[in-house]
Structure formats: C-alpha cells, structure tokens
Amino acid sequence: METGVEMEPMPTCREDEHEGGSDTFFPASEESFGRAARMLHAAGDEARLRLMIRLSEGEMCVTEIAAESGEGMSTISQRLKILRGEGLVVGRREGKHVYYSLADRHVYDVILTILAHADE
C-alpha cells in the first residue's frame, strides 16, 4: 500500500562488526531488574525526586520538611514511606523525631546523573 511517505531501510550489520558482541551485557539477576524498576518508579515522582534532592543536603525530620515545603506532614510522611520502602532513604530515630537522609552515595549519584541527562 502506498502512503506517500518514503521509509528509510532498516540498518543491517553483522555480529562480527561489533566489539564484544552480546558478552558486554550487564550481568544483573532477574531480581535486580525488578528491584531497580521499583526504585526508579519510586524516584520517578517529581515531588519525591525533589524531596530526595533536599535530603541530599543533609538529614531532616518530617516536621522540618513540611515547614520548609509548606506541605502537610502526612503528605511528606507518605512520600518518605515510599522512598524508604525501596531503600532510597533511611530514617534515624531521636526521641519523638525520625530524621531522614538518602540511603547512600549511590542514590545521590543516580539522581544527579538523571538530572544532568534531563538538562542536556
């Protein structure tokens, strides 16, 4: 059927034209792919991403985050619950307060990489 749109042919190549071939695939387990997808999903919400950036500057309690953002404590707590559930943030209890921070440097590096790519 003629559509009036000329299609470019699909590129073809031989396996021997590429260094490494399929041996260069990252050796992650199926469980790692699932966990990574859940982590990215948790971080994929703009408000949660902004919260992680704020926590990259240092630990904060829910009360401080709510006061700074102008949002309710229950909203902040729900976001933190999702991030904590996927291991992206950790909490440290001190009296009646729980202070949250990013889980580790890997989380910070991933966030910065994604934001840098988004700025390109």
Image (tube, rainbow, N blue to C red):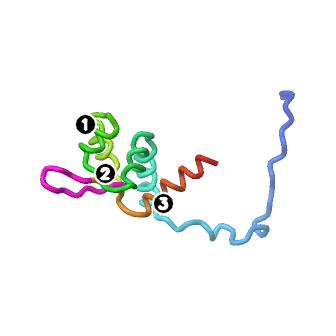
Q: Residues within 10 Å of mark 1 (few under 14, many from 20)?
A: few
- The image quarter in which residue 106 lies: bottom left
Pick the residue in front: 80 or 17: 80
Residue 31: mark: none
Q: Amino acid at mark 3?
A: Asp
* Front: mark 1 or 2: 1
Q: Label 1 to label 3, Cα distance in Å?
A: 28 Å
**Which element carries disc 3, helix, strand or loop?**
helix
From the viewer's perspective, tell me whether residue 8 is left or right of residue 23: right
Q: Residues within 10 Å of mark 3 (few under 14, many from 20)?
A: few
Q: Label 3 to label 2, Cα distance in Å?
A: 19 Å
Query: Measured along the vertical axis of the image, is residue 29 above or below residue 44?
Result: below
Instruction: Please tell me which of labels 1 and 2 falls first in the chain.
Output: 1
Pick the residue in front: 11 or 53: 53
Residue stretch rendered in magenta on the structure: 87-99
Q: Which residue is mark 3?
A: 109
Residue 74: mark: 1
Q: Position of residue 69 (x, y in %)?
A: 34, 38
Q: Which residue is mark 2?
A: 85
Residues under numbered marks 1 and 2 in contact, where contact means CB atoms less than 8 Å apart: no
From the viewer's perspective, tell me whether residue 5 is left or right of residue 108: right
Q: Look at 18% across and 50% down and name the residue there.
A: 97
Q: Does 79 appear in magenta?
A: no
From the viewer's perspective, tell me whether residue 41 is left or right of residue 114: left
